[in-house]
Image (tube, rainbow, N blue to C red):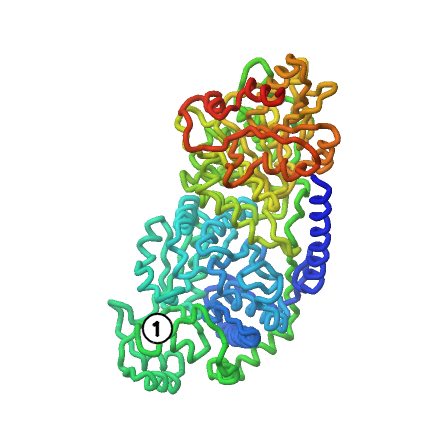
Amino acid sequence: MPTHIADSLTTLTAEQDARNAALLARTPHLGQRIESNVLPFTLDLSRSELSADQDVTLSALEKQAARTAIESLVSLAKVNDIDHLGGGLELIPAFLMTLAVTDYERSHYTIEHGHTSIGYYSALATLGFLDRARVIDGFRRSLDIAGHVSWVPGGTELSSGRLGVMFPVGTGMALGLRGNHGSGSHVICHCGDAGWISGQALDGFNAAAVHHAPITFVMHRNGIQLSGSTRHIMNQDPRPIISSFGIRILEIRSLLERRALFAAYREAFASAQKGHPTLIYPTGWGFAGDAPLTIEDFGQKYAVVDETRAFATENKVALETRVWIPGSLMSFRDIRAMLQCLFYVNDLPGGEAHHDGGMKGRDPQTVLTNRMLAITADETAQLEALRKQAGRKVVTTARPAKGTPNLTLTDADIKDVALPGPEKPVSPRAGSEAAYVAVAKKYPKQLFVVSADLNPSTRLEKAVKLIPAEHHFEMSIEEQAATLLTDGLAFSSRKPQVNVFSTFGAFLEGIAREGFEMWKYQRNLTGVNEGINVLMHFAHVGACTGRDHFSGWSLDWINLALGYLPYLRRFYAPSDARAAFLAVKDATSAYGGHIVAIPRDNLPVLTRGDGKTPLWNATDAWAPVTPFRQHDGAKTAILTIGAPSYLGGEASEKAAARGVPVDVYVVNGFPVDEAFMADLPRKYKRVVTLEDGLIGTVEAGLRGFAAYVAGKVAGNGLELDHVGIVDPQIAPSDTFQEVWAHYGMTADGIAARVVR
């Protein structure tokens, strides 16, 4: 890398490291290991019903959590900001019950509609996991108490991002828990009545049903979306659609009726243990076909008669007006906002949505002193009795650091592995196949594989036959949900475990990108947003896709991998079958995010200078760069990556025959050692890059491996040249050699470039 660029990046990195350290130092709820001593309020799903005392205790906890949420938004209003207070208040009642049935070993939870986060943090603070003052003053203004659901002590490790994502991710976690713990495994996924219709959500329901995941979905059906009521935005009944996938629908009137909700939780848990995932669906009251209810009935039901009458009078709406009362009330316990939401979903004057909103312009005392937040004498007594009991200890530990030993293979484990020799070309898939088989033989109960009806082509088939049936999940062509399911599996254990998703590179580049995108918002307990313990297996990368067609698919694989490099431990681009074996062996040996990109078609096995000895052996350690051809006096170097690497060797030999010595290095993946890149300008005058992917256009500039190398060495006096694909719009449907030739990627063409 040029000195001025290296110095600049070094300085910027050092400055950022200092800022990061300072931020972490003032963030109390993050770290490697946090032991929490919290209120010992737990519920047993084997009990027949919720006791009267437990009902009262939950009511008290709900009110305390709601007060914390409101006070936090009062604090936020002082800096002229808002948040989703309505949804946060609505989450609290059912979520507190979820916290009470979670053991953080076999049973976990997630929240799909992550904008309900203030309810999440407030409930955790009420139990003692979080400092209440921190939640009030730090919400949306700190690293730990973030604006969406993020991991904190007692919280869900599955940080929420886009709507719908947690359906397949939660399903993956449930399947992983079942594979690791067996009976008693369970995940509760809180969700809204908007995200269920997204593609990944529907695929997630399908995956849960097909693979009998022990998961319960709890829909907070408040009837309100971002820009309108649900029936005006997406007027679809979720029940027939979701049940068509094989999800059991458990209808209850309301999530706010604690005893009925607990009975539904019990039934859903029992169903999950039998392999039947369930959706708890609150119907509410007064819907079409139900007994009619009026505004006056609403006031009576929630003991806010005077407030309801006054609000109806203010807006000139008759108390006899029939309404639908949602089974999950937005802004629950904030009386005026709750009434506004009721009127909103019923298209009545005075209705306002509280999807976005908070305490700006409102009187905090009026809200905090309303009767639905007043704690009764019985509730106070139950809380005092609870606080006198020994606390419940819950330990929250960070995910293992990137590079932590995982499923390692010793030389003894692979002594019988026979890798292809240089006698004839062979697909690199043969090498990756052998590595996965070796891992499956040694660690059958620690290997999980998610497939997309492509195991014969991706060569995962043999390994899958060696692992338990409940460790393999076929997802057909649902590639996006499959990547998310695999992400979920990664959250199911802290022990050594490998979670593989395999499909064609073209699908991972496009359809399945969400599986990578999720890594961007998965914050570890250490405060770092990082990739998770998943191996994404790209098959058929580059132009090595057979004679089916040429559409420009799978030509952006290097750019994609480099873009996600901050979230990866390593990205592998093997150039032959033996290198592919080493790539998989190395990827499975350590914890972290990995991409393994395997060409499809038959390629020569690379050899040393004698043309007979393979460049790699099964017992070798993976290295980011391997010298391929070395010649005395060489002032030009070819840096190759992936399938065309053998062309670099042939070009070097042709150049040598013309009296021009050229060295060749095979780059096996990223990150590349900085020392190697820094040494290039000291050894050579010219560097040529060679790759089977998009390297940019005149208008857009360099991309891919070419851009990576240019950024590292530009300004140091090196002459640069690049060989790759600049215009994917027109190409023949032919073998990969003919496609390469169409783009000037031949040994003769490369030799001519380095000789001239």
User: Left of 508 or right of it: where is 144?
Assistant: right
Q: Residue 28 placed where, x, y %?
A: 68, 64
Q: Residue 170 placed where, x, y %?
A: 49, 52
Between residue 45 and residue 299, name the one nearer to us.
299
61 above or below 632?
Answer: below
Number of labels in the image equals 1
Q: Residue 186 placed where, x, y %?
A: 50, 53
User: Left of 572 or right of it: where is 11?
Assistant: right
- Viewport quadrant of the N terminus: top right
User: Which residue of the protein is positioned furthest toward the left in this rendering?
Assistant: 289
Q: Residue 524 lies in what quarter of the image? A: bottom right
Q: Residues within 10 Å of mark 1 (few under 14, many from 20)?
A: many
- Amino acid type, label 1: Tyr
The residue positioned 61% from the left and 46% from the top of the image is 566
Between residue 586 and residue 411, name the one nearer to us.
586
Between residue 263 and residue 114, name the one nearer to us.
114
Q: Is residue 257 visible?
A: no
Residue under pointer 1: 344
Q: Is residue 416 visible?
A: yes
Q: Residue 678 lies in what quarter of the image? A: top right
- Viewport quadrant of the C terminus: top right
The residue positioned 50% from the left and 46% from the top of the image is 515
**Circle 1 — which element?**
helix
Q: Residue 184 placed where, x, y %?
A: 52, 52
Q: Residue 258 lies in what quarter of the image? A: bottom left
